[in-house]
Image: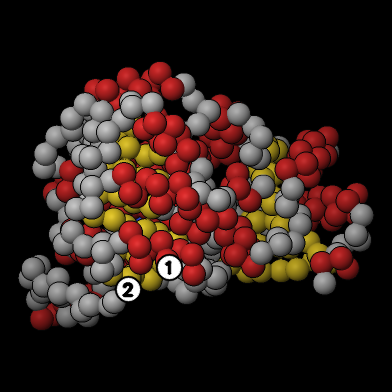
């Protein structure tokens, strides 16, 4: 990957007295369309986040991009906003999606769809979600009518492609989101197959919190001279999060006891995610908290889609205060305001720690992350 100097975005008039302000980019300086700017303003955003300020002009120049960014940095809007601007020209044809976004989990796919609905309020675009666990019929019907934006998990997409229900040769833009998580979940061969099915003339964007060699290789193979944009350093946690370790006995009942005390004693706890390493423990900790009278929900990979969505909606709406979750189920969830993260188990990989902690302290807010440790965690 080579770095190339970006052309400065100097279209907007800058008055001399505003020279200081000029260093803080504005959404209106980035080349976005009026419709998109109106939606951004309706969303209440004042200034672009660093990843948005860097990525949006490059995407609008039609260049490929590798974005190294954690969730919580505003990276979703950094591709959704310029895509909306670009999609204003042209229209969808039956079975031939114009843009394709690959997500590792159904929840993330659903969240990107919500982003399109939120920022696309002034557009008449068709967005389809192609994810496992929901009725195929509905998805196919929508595809047949023609979609502007297809958001998919790799397995379901390949499945439909093989049945001849979808044509890939109209795809103008491909987004590979959360590439490092795709790698963890064994999706890279699927991603490679999908990339080979798409027109080579497409624009490709890839986002990843970290850049392991396999992801770099993927970028080298399937992206054309991409511009790299980066915000927070990979594998670092946000500065706004206070992090603590709390010692516990090694037995499960000791840890559950410590967790309850922590939750009861935490000041300003609004809502929290409790992470467990294993699905089985998610279930056990969930039941235990429920028995002790906490307002709690659970999220793990074995739950069906409807139950997951219901839990997530309850948590977002504030009906559920504590969410017990596994890493895969919780990856990248867009829950804007989580005050606390508890690691019931010390995560096995440092990157999982970073991702878990990334659930709090988002978009400049403050957060607390507490990890329960036993003598087995040395
Ligand atoms: P993401 O990194 O895409 O998961 O976004 C994290 C959160 O930041 C989401 O809740 C967004 O709604 C919010 N967000 C995105 N862009 C901005 C912005 N420019 N200003 C304030 N909040 C934002």
Residue 334 seen by the camera: no
Q: Secondary structure at mark 1?
A: helix
- Horizontal and vertical percent for residue 142? 31, 24
- Horizontal and vertical percent for residue 101? 35, 45
Residue 247 seen by the camera: yes
Image quadrant containing the C terminus:
bottom right
Q: Is mark 1 within 8 Å of ligand 1?
A: no
Q: Secondary structure at mark 2?
A: loop
Image-quadrant location for residue 62? bottom left
Residue for point 82% across, 67% down: 377
Residue for point 24% across, 43% down: 171
As drawn, the label of residue 19 is none
Image-quadrant location for residue 2? bottom left
Marks 1 & 2, CB-CB < 8 Å contact: yes
Q: Is residue 323 left or right of residue 49?
A: right
Q: Is residue 359 left or right of residue 326?
A: left
As drawn, the label of residue 216 is 1
Image quadrant containing the N terminus:
bottom left
Q: Is residue 309 above or below residue 214?
A: above
Q: Which residue is mark 2?
A: 1
Residue for point 32% across, 20% down: 141
- Horizontal and vertical percent for residue 92? 18, 33
10 Å neighbourhood of mark 2: few (<14), some, or many (≥20)?
some
Figure quadrant, ligand 1: bottom left
């Amino acid at each position: 990957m080579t770095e190339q100097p970006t052309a400065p975005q100097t279209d907007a008039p800058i008055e001399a007295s505003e020279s200081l302000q000029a260093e803080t980019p504005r959404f209106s300086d980035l080349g976005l369309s009026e419709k998109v700017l109106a939606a951004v303003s309706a969303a209440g955003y004042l200034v672009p986040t660093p990843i948005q300020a860097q990525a949006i002009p490059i995407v609008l120049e039609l260049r490929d991009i590798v974005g190294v960014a954690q969730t919580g940095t505003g990276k979703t809007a950094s591709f959704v906003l310029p895509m909306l601007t670009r999609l204003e020209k042209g229209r969808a044809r039956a079975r031939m999606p114009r843009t394709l976004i690959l997500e590792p989990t159904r929840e993330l796919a659903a969240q990107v769809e919500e982003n399109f609905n939120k920022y696309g309020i002034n557009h008449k675009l068709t967005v389809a979600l192609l994810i496992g666990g929901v009725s195929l019929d509905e998805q196919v019907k929508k595809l047949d009518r023609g979609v502007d934006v297809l958001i998919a998990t790799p397995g379901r997409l390949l499945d439909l492609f093989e049945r001849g229900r979808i044509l890939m040769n109209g795809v103008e833009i491909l987004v590979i989101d959360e590439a490092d998580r795709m790698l963890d979940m064994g999706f890279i061969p699927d991603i490679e197959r999908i990339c080979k099915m798409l027109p080579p003339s497409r624009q490709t964007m890839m986002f990843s919190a970290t850049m392991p060699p396999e992801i770099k290789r993927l970028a080298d193979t399937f992206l054309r001279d991409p511009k790299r944009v980066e915000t927070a350093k990979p594998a670092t946690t946000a500065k706004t999060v206070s992090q603590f370790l709390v010692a516990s006995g090694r037995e499960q009942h000791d840890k559950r006891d410590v967790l309850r005390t922590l939750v009861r004693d935490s000041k300003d706890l609004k809502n929290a995610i409790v992470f467990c390493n294993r699905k089985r423990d998610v279930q056990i900790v969930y039941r235990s908290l429920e028995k002790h009278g906490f307002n709690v929900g659970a999220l793990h990979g074995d739950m069906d889609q409807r139950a997951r969505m219901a839990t997530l909606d309850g948590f977002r709406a504030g009906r559920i205060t504590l969410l017990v979750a596994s890493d895969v189920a919780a990856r990248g969830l867009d829950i804007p305001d989580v005050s606390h993260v508890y690691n019931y188990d010390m995560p096995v990989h440092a990157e999982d720690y970073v991702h878990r902690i990334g659930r709090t302290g988002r978009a400049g807010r403050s957060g607390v992350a507490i990890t329960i440790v036993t003598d087995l965690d040395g």
